[in-house]
Amino acid sequence: MIEGVFWRVEHIIIQYWGWLLGYTIPLLVGFYIVHWRERQGKPPQGGAITCYMACLVWPVILLIMVIFIIAMLFREAAICGTSWIDSLILIILRRKIHFDETGELWRSSAPNAELYAQWVKVKDKTGVHWIQVPLSIKTARDGVAWTYGLKEDEYHPTVRS
Amino acid sequence: MTEQYIQGDVMFIKSEKPYMTKEWRALQPTGGVHILARGEKTGHTHTVDANAVDLFEIATGRVVVVKESVYVYHQEHDPLLLPEGEYDVRIQRQYVPQEAPRRVYD
């Protein structure tokens, strides 16, 4: 469970938004210094206005990031046949149970033990794709074969573009 | 082993023996090309030159008869070269609980 949540957070924030963390710390330091100079009665520096503007922008950036994360989760929840809440729970709790050259097999189960789902995660030129597969699937190769209506031993692509 | 060619969410399985039966319905090309599959979300298409292939629809899907080697084109994937032969066209599907599998939302 923790691995699933951490994977989502790590993948989104660190890989795509990590540079914002390095941007935020100097902003917060500059903001504090500006206010400290004002309390000391010292005239503001030329960079004060820039600092204030940047500090006002940061909450907007944070809001956009949160909306982006939520939108991604809801987009993936749309592929599940359950309710939105159940779909979100399944996506957050999913963990990788098998991988091979064809892709990865992920499984998720909700705390009520009646809600299960499995996905194969495949990568191609257009990006990463999550495709839900039946619970009877045991390997990533079997899952990918199932998506094309084949059994695992029948799946042997000659060419893939 | 049968040859299998994949372009994104579409697989072409070369048949070892002819599929041809009387239940086939020939499909007409559009603008000189046959559209083998179309993405519901993106509208992207898998197309081939209609002069090189014949496309048929059967109860369980589609069959494409390649009269001479031809490229299958798609807006996001590299062109896929299909050798001469008869192919079963399979569209990738996804599991939906308590329902029949449906096509991957592309």
Image (cartoon, grey):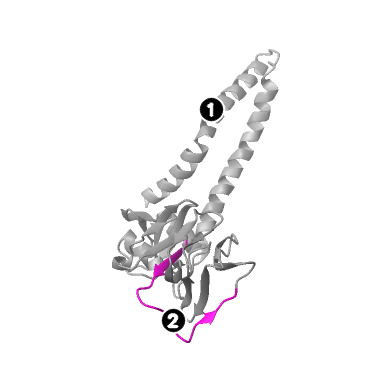
Q: Closest to the observer: A145 or A19?
A: A145
* Percent x, y of residue B77: 50, 54
Question: Given the image, on which type of amino acid does mark 1 rest?
Answer: Ile
Query: Which is closer to the viewer, label 2 or label 1?
Result: 2
Image mark for residue A25: 1
Q: Which residue: 41% across, 79% down?
A: B19
- Residue A152 position in % (x across, y down): 31, 66
Question: Taking A71 as reference, is B51 above or below it?
Answer: below
Residue located at (52% from left, 33% from top) = A19
| The residue stretch that appears in magenta | B9-28
Residue drawn at 28 percent across, 66 percent down: A153
Lateral position of residue A154 relative to residue A21, left or right? left
Circle 1 SS class: helix
Determine the CA span between mark 2 and mark 1: 69 Å
Does the magenta portion include A62? no
Task: Identify which residue, A142 or A95, lies in the foreground.
Answer: A142
* Relative to B61, residue B80 above or below: above
Residue B20: mark in rendering? 2
